[in-house]
Image (cartoon, grey):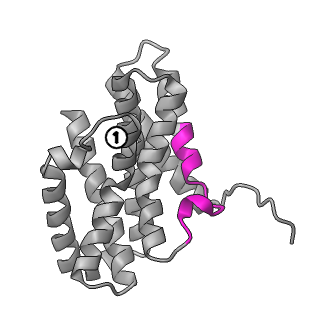
Amino acid sequence: MLYNLIDVLGTIAFAISGVLVAMDKRLDVFGVFIIAFVTAVGGGTLRDVLIGSTPVGWMTQPNYVVVIVITVVISILFVDRLKNFRKSLFLFDTIGIGLYTMIGIQKGLDTGLLPIMCIALGTMTACFGGVIRDILCNEIPVIFRREIYATVCILGGGIYFLMLQFPINPTIAYITGILCIIVMRLLAVKFKIALPNIYSK
């Protein structure tokens, strides 16, 4: 139940971030839907292909498409209100990576992968929908900039597996992993924490 709820919330968060980027680029309705769709399911599609879970999730479960369509329609109707929040895109993107990282990790555990591989799978699940979105919208993907992005997914996944070594309810560890990713990303941006630039001025 918790897993399904988080999956839906992650889909909604990433779909909204896709809508906001697409509308900033002044795409038509079809373009907005496509960007929202690939943002929401792009990472999960890559994940499912890598672990051999085919057909991929959104092809066998139409509820993903339904959730994305409803989210796109509501986001378009209330886009002015969304844009009133200066950090709306950043916020929904941050929530999305927190939720999707743990979904990817859970998928890896279900497949019997080692923790380090589960973290890698979770990071790809969280980040690659945004990578596809940014490439299609002619932007440099956030994951390739100096911002702390994929790093917090890795750290959050590590915290989750560390907590599992103690007598803690796995659900609490799961939720803590999500919250740690979201909080670390928020703090990194607030305090302008970034990875070092390897290029000299």
Asked if residue 58 shows in the view, the reply is yes
Asked whether 117 or 50 is in front, the reply is: 50
**Which quarter of the figure is the C terminus placed in?**
bottom right
Q: Quadrant of residue 32?
A: bottom left
Quadrant of the rendered structure where residue 14 is? bottom left
**Is 103 on the left or on the right of 159, as rendered?**
left
Q: Which residue is mark 1?
A: 48
Residue 21, percent from left and from top: 39, 75
> In the visual, does 92 lie left or right of 162?
left
Asked if the magenta segment contains residue 161, the reply would be no
Q: Position of residue 1 (x, y in %)?
A: 18, 33
Q: Amino acid at mark 1?
A: Asp
Q: Residue 39: percent from the left, percent from the top?
A: 35, 61
The kind of secondary structure element at disc 1 is helix
Residue found at x 31% / y 72%:
19
Which quadrant holds residue 179? top left
Figure label count: 1
Hey, which residue is sitting farthest right in the picture? 200
The magenta span reads 140-155
How many C-alpha atoms fall within 10 Å of the one at disc 1: few (<14), some, or many (≥20)? some
In the image, residue 131 above or below residue 1: below
Name which residue lies at 34% across and 40% down.
48
x 26%, y 85%: residue: 28
Q: Is residue 148 above or below residue 84?
A: above
